[in-house]
């Protein structure tokens, strides 16, 4: 067969172009984002860092961690992130959980991952560890963030004045300047060192700073995480001062969480054993000590206790008491309604949950589609199919108007149409 020379030439040029695109595409993909050392042992990485005189960045992640996945898919591949981290660090990752789907490369790092987790006391994910070229841990940061904030974490790791563990050494050597203590406490918080944050914040407050200063008020709010912390009494005794700076809702939620954690640690073993009289005695004691938080905390403890025992009658009785009070917000009320919907088949209790659900949106100026979805689902479980379908479509329309995908709630609508359970 005679070959058409122009066709052959075109095909040849196309092949060259494709090879060029593949080649440059591969280089671009490599250059665009962070380059990680895959398959290397921790010992080999330490050796390479020392030889190249480069810092080390370690991403400590798990397979189930949503923020970890976000960083890997959205932030690490960005060009500006890669440009900074590839220039200044040897980048590596260690998966700190194990799964049946782990490949051989991950399995080969199990021992190193276990060593890092234990040695550096990793408790939250993602945790980022930063080492100097000599393999000494100098900085630590946590959590997902956008590119600019993530780059800032890396810049702090390169700056001796910002490196958390370098600053801890200064503290251990005796430095107690108030401004230094304040920065150190914030650094401890960012490094998820709660004990350190409490200690350094306590030392700062012992220097008797001006507590009319808004920056100091915010500092106490942000570094107080336990009822044992020095800032707890300040927050409890002067709520108006803190509310004016951080907002009433944020202040209430923070203090409520601190009190709940302290009370839970002290009493959790008794909750499942208490009768009504013992619960009432505990509630009375809590109301004297924390009058603005007692009802909210009691509701949480009681419902958790009854949920564990699957005592849905008692569970509903507790929620009913507080459903119309200020001690339960609409989000909490929706959670309780959804729990009954998914866990309980008693029609009388489901009717109560339907009433709670309606309270979450009927008088609200800005309505949450998810709350209306809960209402529709409970209606459906009660056998009110057409009404349930009407409300679920209202929830879908509202969700779309608020910027959600056009198929929001469609799976529920389809199930209701077919008459199959949504629970």
Image (cartoon, rainbow, N blue to C red):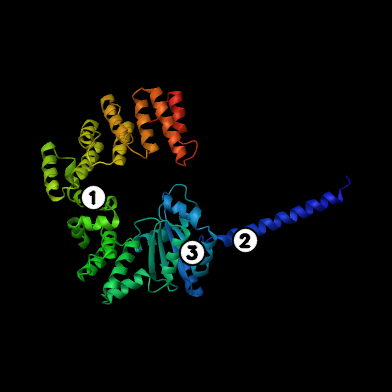
Q: Quadrant of residue 395?
A: top left
Q: Quadrant of residue 30?
A: bottom right
Q: In the image, 44: left or right of 372? A: right
Q: In the image, 352: left or right of 41? A: left
Circle 1 SS class: helix
Q: Nearer the viewer, mark 2 or mark 1?
A: 1
Mark 1 — residue?
256
User: Residue 197: x, y in percent?
Assistant: 28, 64
| Residue plotted at (18% across, 59% down) | 233
Mark 2 — residue?
27
Camera-side residue of 227 and 95: 227
Image quadrant in which the N terminus is located? top right
User: Residue 178: x, y in percent?
Assistant: 26, 72
Image quadrant in which the C terminus is located? top left
User: Residue 391: x, y in percent?
Assistant: 40, 29
**Crowd class of label 2 (few under 14; some 14 to 19; many from 20; radius 10 Å):** few
Mark linked to residue 161: none
Q: In the image, 281: left or right of 92? A: left
- Measured Cα–Cα span from mark 1 to mark 3: 40 Å
């Amino acid at each position: 067969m005679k070959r058409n020379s122009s066709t052959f030439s075109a095909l040849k040029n196309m092949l060259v172009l494709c090879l060029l695109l593949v080649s440059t595409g591969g280089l671009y993909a490599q250059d665009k984002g962070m380059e990680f050392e895959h398959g290397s042992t921790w010992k080999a990485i330490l050796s390479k860092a020392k030889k190249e005189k480069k810092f080390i960045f370690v991403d400590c992640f798990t397979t189930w961690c949503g923020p970890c996945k976000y960083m890997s898919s959205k932030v690490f591949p960005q060009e500006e992130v890669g440009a900074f981290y590839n220039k200044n660090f040897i980048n590596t990752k260690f998966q700190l959980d194990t799964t049946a789907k782990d490949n051989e490369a991950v399995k080969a790092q199990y021992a190193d991952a276990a060593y890092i987790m234990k040695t550096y006391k990793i408790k939250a994910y993602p945790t980022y560890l930063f080492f100097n070229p000599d393999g000494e841990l100098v900085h630590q940061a946590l959590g997902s963030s956008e590119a600019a904030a993530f780059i800032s974490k890396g810049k702090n790791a390169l700056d001796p004045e910002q490196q958390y563990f370098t600053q801890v050494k200064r503290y251990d050597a005796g430095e107690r300047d108030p401004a230094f203590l304040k920065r150190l406490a914030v650094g401890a918080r960012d490094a998820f060192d709660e004990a350190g944050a409490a200690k350094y914040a306590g030392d700062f407050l012992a220097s008797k700073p001006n507590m009319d200063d808004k920056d100091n008020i915010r500092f106490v709010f942000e570094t107080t995480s336990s009822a044992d912390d020095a800032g707890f009494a300040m927050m409890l005794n002067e709520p108006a001062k803190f509310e004016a700076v951080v907002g009433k809702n944020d202040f209430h939620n923070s203090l409520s969480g601190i009190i709940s954690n302290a009370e839970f640690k002290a009493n959790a073993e008794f909750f499942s054993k208490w009768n009504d009289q013992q619960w009432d005695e505990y509630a009375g004691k809590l109301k004297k000590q924390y009058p603005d938080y007692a009802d909210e905390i009691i509701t949480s403890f009681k419902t958790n206790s009854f949920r564990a025992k699957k005592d849905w009658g008692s569970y509903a009785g507790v929620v009913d008491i507080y459903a119309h009070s200020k001690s339960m917000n609409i989000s909490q009320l929706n959670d309780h309604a959804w729990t009954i919907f998914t866990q309980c088949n008693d029609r009388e209790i489901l009717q109560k949950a339907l009433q709670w659900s309606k309270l979450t949106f009927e008088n609200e100026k800005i309505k949450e589609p998810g709350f209306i979805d809960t209402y529709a689902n409970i209606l459906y479980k009660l056998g009110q199919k057409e009404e349930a379908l009407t409300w679920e479509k209202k929830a879908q329309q509202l969700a779309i108007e608020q910027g959600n995908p056009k198929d929001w709630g469609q799976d529920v609508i389809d199930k209701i149409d077919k008459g199959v359970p949504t629970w």
